[in-house]
Amino acid sequence: MDMYDAMFSAGYILCERVARQVFDVLAENGPLLAIMDRSGNCWAGAPEAFDRHHPGDTVLESLWAKVDDGFEPAVAPIDNGTVVTAQLATEHTNCGYLVLVLLHDTPWTEGQMNLAEALFGQIGLVARLIETATLLSDTQVKCYSAYGTEEAPAN
């Protein structure tokens, strides 16, 4: 397998675009949010903080297994808080996972779950809008190139 295949996959490109849009609007002291694709690439809103509070590969893989089985969002306690994961997918692309790390001293509540689900839903909407805009742009370019070659004057 070519090492660049993952970088040019639809999931990688969409994850990168979603990360740029979402992380630009996150508050500096907000939750630790990361987007992780299925190839192991990670985009984090606050990379240094996410690295310090990374839940660990074992925890993430067990949560992702739950998400893949349809239990979403999946929640697990970690040393200093809670980690919540959900799938990031659109109609055409299965990008990977959203990972939300909430640092706190209080137990996980239903209200926090509702906020996490709302955040994940909004990020999923951003992904769908980016994918739709990309598909429309690609279609428009194909239409222009098809009409442009037929009507172009010969010099």
Image: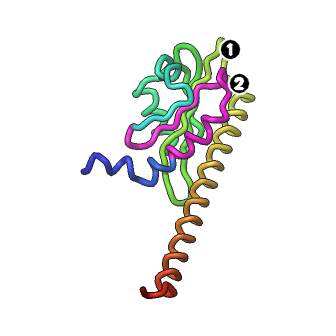
Q: Which residue is mark 2?
A: 109
Kind of element beneath mark 1: loop
Counting from the top left corner in percent of width and height, residue 41 is at: 41, 37
Observer-nearest of 143 and 73: 143
Magenta residue check for 145? no
**What residue sits 71% from the left and 28% below the top?**
112
**What residue sits 53% from the left and 70% below the top?**
141
Other-residue count near label 1 (Cα within 10 Å), few / some / many at <14 / 14–19 / ≥20? few
Range shown magenta: 15-40
- The image shows residue 151, relative to residue 78, as above or below, that is below
Counting from the top left corner in percent of width and height, residue 71 is at: 56, 41
Observer-nearest of 107 and 120: 120
In this rendering, position of residue 33 left or right of residue 95 = right
Counting from the top left corner in percent of width and height, residue 42 is at: 45, 35
Are circles 1 and 2 on residues that touch, CB within 8 Å?
yes
Kind of element beneath mark 2: loop
- The image shows residue 2, relative to residue 31, as above or below, that is below
Residue 77 quadrant: top right
**What residue sits 48% from the left and 87% below the top?**
153
- The image shows residue 16, relative to residue 153, as above or below, that is above
The residues bearing labels 1 and 2 have C-alpha atoms spaced at a distance of 9 Å
Task: Using the image, tell me which numbered label, if any, was put on residue 18.
Answer: none
**What residue sits 26% from the left and 50% below the top?**
2
Q: Which residue is mark 1?
A: 106
